[in-house]
Image (tube, rainbow, N blue to C red):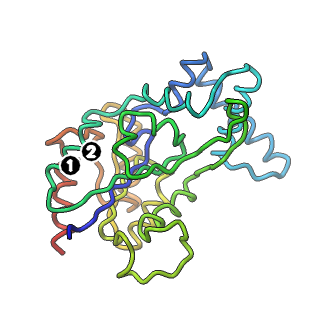
Amino acid sequence: MKELFALIFDSDLTLTPNYMQRPIFEEYGINERLFWQQKNDFKDFHQSKDLLVDWTNAWLIQLIKEVNEKGLSLSNEKLKDLGAKIEFFKGIPEFFINLKEDLPEVEIEYYIITSGLRKMIQGSLIGPLMTEIYGCEFIEKNGVIYQIANSVNETHKTRYLFEINKGTTLVNDRIPHHDRRIPWDHMIYIGDGDTDIPCFEVIKDHGGHCLGVHHPTIKKARITAEKLLDEDRIPYFFEADYSKGSELYDYLIKLVTSASNT
C-alpha cells in the first residue's frame, strides 16, 4: 500500500497572484480599493462600540451588503462561474498532475484551506484536482446569497489540519497517532504570509513540513517571506513558480521522497 501524503495550500497570493474576489468586482463594477476600505471601516466602527468583529466576517458581510444595496444576482452557482476567471501562478494547474506523475511511489492528496470563497475555487481550473477545499460559504435565498454559512479566519484554518490528519470532522475525538489517516510528517503546508502563521506553527509543532512562497516580481511579497524566515515561521521560501523544474517543484519532489523513506 502506498504511503499517503497531503499537500495543503493557502489560496490567495499562494496559488494566485491576486485576491480571488477580483472577478466578482470586475463582473459587478465594484471598486476593489473602496470595498476593502469599507470592510475596514465596518470592522473599526463596530469595534469602537466594544464589539469583537472578525476580519473574515467583516468582508463577507460587506459583500452581502453590496449584493443587497445594488440588487446583484450573486448566487453560489454564479460564484462557481466566476471562479473560472481566477488567475493562477505559473505552472498551475499542470503542477497538480505533474507532481503525482513524478512521485508514483506515493499517493498525494491536495487540499486548500482559505479565508476566500470555497465555491469560487470549486469552479476554478484547480477545483476538480482538489481532494477537499475548506473556505467561506454563503447560504442563499431565492437564488441570491444573503447569510454567512461558514467563515474561515487564520486560526479557524488550523482545525482543518486536524481533520486532514485524523481523517474525520470530529477533531476532538481521541485517535491514536498510528491510527490517524495522514501522519503529520506526511503533511506539507504552503502559504505566503502572516495569516498562515497559525498553520505553520501547528504543522511544525507536530512534526510536519511547511514552506513559504512569494510573488516573483513583487518586492513586498518577498520581504514578507524573508520576515517569516527570520522569525523561524518557515524553514525555506521560494518564488511562486509551480512549473516542472522550478526550485519550488524540485524541492517538493525531494521533500516527499525523503519523508517517504523515513
Identify whether 166 is placed above or below 147: below
Locate residue 92 relative to residue 79 in the image: left or right: left
In terms of depth relative to the viewer, which is nearer, 61 or 98? 98
Q: Position of residue 165 (x, y in %)?
A: 41, 68
Quarter-wise, where is residue 63 in the image?
top right
Q: Which mark is residue 96?
A: 2
Residue position marked by numbered label 1 in the rendering? 99
Q: Residue most toward the top?
A: 29
Locate residue 69 relative to residue 103 in the image: left or right: right
Q: Which mark is residue 130?
A: none
Question: Which residue does the image show at 27% across and 46% down from the upper left?
Answer: 238
Q: Position of residue 147 (x, y in %)?
A: 72, 41
Question: Which residue does the image show at 20% across and 70% down from the upper left?
Answer: 1
Amino acid type of the residue tagged 1 in the rendering: Leu
Quarter-wise, where is residue 117 in the image?
top right
In terms of depth relative to the viewer, which is nearer, 142 or 134? 142
At mark 1, the secondary structure is helix
Question: Which residue does the image show at 50% across and 32% down from the upper left?
Answer: 80
At mark 2, the secondary structure is helix
Quarter-wise, where is residue 45 in the image?
top right
Give the alpha-carbon distance from disc 1 to disc 2, as whole Å.
6 Å
> Quick check: marks 1 and 2 in contact, CB under 8 Å?
yes
In terms of depth relative to the viewer, which is nearer, 203 or 64? 64
